[in-house]
Amino acid sequence: MRLADFIVQHVDRIVDEWEQFAKIITPDDSLDRMTLRDHARSILLAAARDMRTAQTVSEQAAKAKGEGPEKTPSLDQAAASHGELRHNVGFDLVQMTSEFRHLRACVIRLWVNSLDAPDLQYFQDMIRFNEAIDEALAESTAAYAEQVNRSRDIFLAILGHDLRAPLQAVSMSTEMLIRKGQLDADAQMYAQGIKSSARHMAVMVSDLLELVRSRLGNSLPIEPAPMDLATAAQAALDEASAGQPDCDAQLTVEGDTQGVWDRARLDQLLQNLIGNALQHGENKRPITLCISGVDHQVTLTMHNHGAPIPPDALGTIFDPLVRSASEELAGSSTSLGLGLFIVKQVVDAHQGTIEVNSNETDGTTFSVVLPRVSRVVS
């Protein structure tokens, strides 16, 4: 009997073995029979239908490399649903993939035992069955991994949201202590340190929430309103200088710097660009922020001297969770590697562009070009 016919005729027997194996490895002894057997029948019958479909030698070679012209919709749908459900009921990835290993071995064993004599076609059947199971395994694993990522992102979103309230309480309480003016010099210094750290943590939480928002498929929301970019830049530099009194930050302004943008988002952009320049800039050399407006656009450039960005890092400089080699070696940075990612998100939300140039002679310059009027993209 051909393997596809064998699977269809004995599908219930095969699924019984699937259920018994799933029962052994399940992390939850209370799972019912339907959950343990979920999608097994659909996967097997879809695999049998795929095996009965004609396939050329070139198509087989391409499929072996994961480059087949088309997937099997019913097989992929059942496998993806299986991966999602196994994640939801507590299976880990090793347990889930072991089900497919057992399924493959079970079907081959039962079928081979039923054969009277080997035939060349039977070997071809085995290849086709293995291809179908590999496709199901790949789809199921991808769906499982997506569920893991989504669960992690939702957890981070909840964590970031819940951290905002206690951080705000710390900031407000510290501000009240400082304003009372009855602290001695040491206590005043400690309070200022708490205030600065709380502000830094708030920025990190905000960056984390923006990362999660983007990973969950939501674009960065903006609320454009008339504003002056030069005024915002000066305020951001003043705040940075208050946190690092030794820094030498210079602002130059040319032309009309008025526009319609989201002030809060541009504050994020400025804080991250300035913070990045201060962190990586050479000590005792100034960082320079230039704002210039011409025609229908305004350009912002942030420059610092110091070690250049390695050429092989320029392509991923705006990717999330990317930190420089020096930061990794030092192990002392509190950065999440999200600052420049947030900058790019803000620029994209305003339909602008951003570029970076970095070399030993000229230092590092980030150049942002914003249309004078940004519109909300629905």
Image: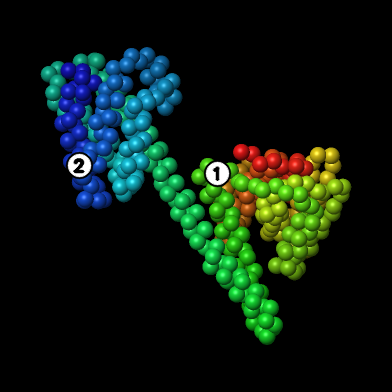
Identify the secondary structure beneath mark 1.
Answer: loop
Residue 262 versus residue 246: which sits nearer the camera?
Answer: 262
Residue at x-position 64% and y-position 39% = 377
Give the residue pinned by disc 1: 218
Residue 190, quarter of picture: bottom right
- Left or right relative to 283: residue 145: left
Q: Quadrant of the C terminus?
A: top right
- Left or right relative to 285: residue 266: left
Outermost residue toward the right? Answer: 255
Residue at x-position 14% and y-position 26% = 113
Residue 371 versus residue 94: which sits nearer the camera?
Answer: 371
Spatial separation of the CA atoms under disc 2 and disc 1: 38 Å
Task: Name the amino acid type tagged 2.
Answer: Arg
Give the residue pinned by disc 2: 33
Residue at x-position 78% and y-position 46% = 259
Residue 333 higher or lower than 92, as above or below? below
Residue 130 versus residue 22: which sits nearer the camera?
Answer: 22
First of labels 2, 1 by sequence position: 2
Residue 119, quarter of picture: top left
Q: Position of residue 243 (x, y in %)?
A: 70, 67
Identify the secondary structure beneath mark 2.
Answer: helix
Residue 114 higher or lower than 323, as above or below? above
